[in-house]
Amino acid sequence: MESEIRARIEAEIEALQTARDELRVKVHLGAAEVRDVWEAAEKSWSHLEGRAKVLAEATQESIEDVGAAVDVLAEEIRRGYQHVRKLL
């Protein structure tokens, strides 16, 4: 009886350890994915700030071009932030 209980407990601990190890990897990878998505959004944010400065100084002819680029960057950042929210 005692050996059966010991074996059951050891099997349970082993199963929990396996599950723990798998989750540790997923959490680590998830954190890396969140970090990657965030860094990409931050890079786009820097570009957006630069484009906004150019837009403030742009001539009427180039405003449309710069404005279109800002729209694209803003949407990219928006999608990145939505992705980060889902990952958290």
Image (cartoon, helix red, strand yellow):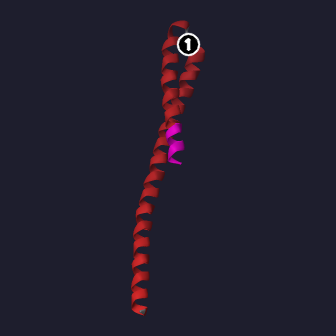
- The residue that appears at 40% across and 75% down in the rendered structure is 14
Q: Residue furthest front?
A: 1
Q: Residue furthest right?
A: 56
First to last magenta residue range: 81-88
Q: Is residue 12 above or below residue 48?
A: below
Question: What count of labels does the image hold?
Answer: 1
When asked about the image quadrant of residue 45, the answer is top right
- The residue that appears at 53% across and 22% down in the rendered structure is 51
Q: Secondary structure at mark 1?
A: loop
Q: Position of residue 32 (x, y in %)?
A: 45, 50
Q: Which residue is mark 1?
A: 58
Q: Nearer the viewer, residue 53 or 21?
A: 21
- The residue that appears at 45% across and 47% down in the rendered structure is 33
Q: Is residue 23 above or below residue 39?
A: below
- The residue that appears at 48% across and 21% down in the rendered structure is 69
Magenta-colored segment: predominant secondary structure? helix
Q: Position of residue 13 (x, y in %)?
A: 44, 77
Q: What amino acid is found at the position of numbered circle 1 in the picture?
A: Ala
Q: Is residue 35 magenta?
A: no
Q: Quadrant of the N terminus?
A: bottom left
Q: Is residue 48 above or below residue 80?
A: above
Q: Residue furthest top?
A: 61
Q: Residues within 10 Å of mark 1 (few under 14, many from 20)?
A: some
Q: Is residue 13 above or below residue 4?
A: above
Q: Is residue 86 magenta?
A: yes
Q: Nearer the viewer, residue 38 or 25?
A: 25
Q: Position of residue 59 (x, y in %)?
A: 55, 9
Q: Position of residue 41 (x, y in %)?
A: 50, 36
